[in-house]
Image: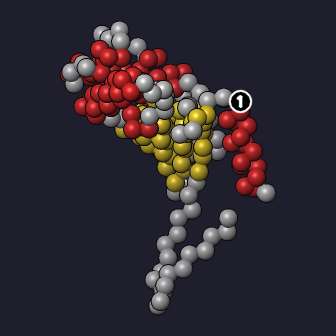
Amino acid sequence: MKFIMVLLNVLLILSVTGKANAHGLNMSTAQVTLRQNNHISIRVHTSLKEVLAQLSWQGKPKSFTQLATATENNLKPMSLALHTLFTKNMPVSFGEKEMNSKKARLPSPKQLQVKLQKALAEKVMQKRQGQHQDEFHRSNDLVIEIDGFIPKGVTNSQIQISFPKELGAIMVSYNKPQVQTLKAGKSATRYHQAL
């Protein structure tokens, strides 16, 4: 019964957004994970090209081609704008208290340059081969990881995340893994978990 409810919710989300394709969802996703009752990690997966089209920074090139062919040094302002987007412009709080020790891990300017060049190469190849361009390229997507801790003394057990508008539609999932240490058995180590 629980599986059917989850499946119905996913289908409802897909029908409302209208942005599903054969290779996956054409929207940003975020996975929020609570570990050890105080550590929060947020993994955001979004289209690099779409976020950069929405993001503003000083010296932003007028076209994607100019951006993809920019030097690593010229991509530093873009990298800084992305960092600001996912740190200062994406508050994470618990009631009135902000997340403690918030750290964001984003690709370096060099890694961004490689992703942009791959996206441009794929675009050129698809045009030459007359193929329809699929907007969903996982290899060129942007993955951001944000970690921090729930502040001490928080009585509100609800997390609030304000995702930046540049991400567009976003599907968020939450999980709280149950971790167990298993002692070695004589012939096997058995694990049982109610589903």
Q: Position of residue 82 (x, y in %)?
A: 38, 25
Q: Which residue is mark 1?
A: 16
Q: Residue at x 49, y 49 (%)?
A: 39
Which of these two is toward me, 159 or 60? 60
Tell which residue pokes out farthest to the front in this image.
129
Q: In the displayed structure, does residue 157 sit left or right of residue 103?
A: right
Q: At x 35% / y 27%, what residue is drawn?
A: 125
Task: Tell me where residue 154 appears, x and y as whole percent.
Answer: 59, 43
177 or 48, which is in the foreground?
48
Q: Which residue reaches farthest bottom? A: 186
From the viewer's perspective, is residue 152 above or below residue 50?
A: below
Number of numbered callouts drawn: 1
Judge from the rendering whether residue 125 lies leftward or rightward of residue 135; answer left or right.
left
| Secondary structure beneath label 1 | helix
Evaluate whether residue 193 shows in this view. yes
Query: Which residue appears at 76% of the width and 52% of the height?
Result: 4
Q: Residues within 10 Å of mark 1 (few under 14, many from 20)?
A: few
What residue type is disc 1 on? Val
Residue 26 position by quadrant: top right
In this picture the colour scheme is secondary structure
Tell me the quarter of the image containing the C terminus: bottom right
In this rendering, does residue 164 appear at all? no
**Residue at (44, 34) in percent of width and height:** 137
Nearest the viewer among 27 and 123 is: 123
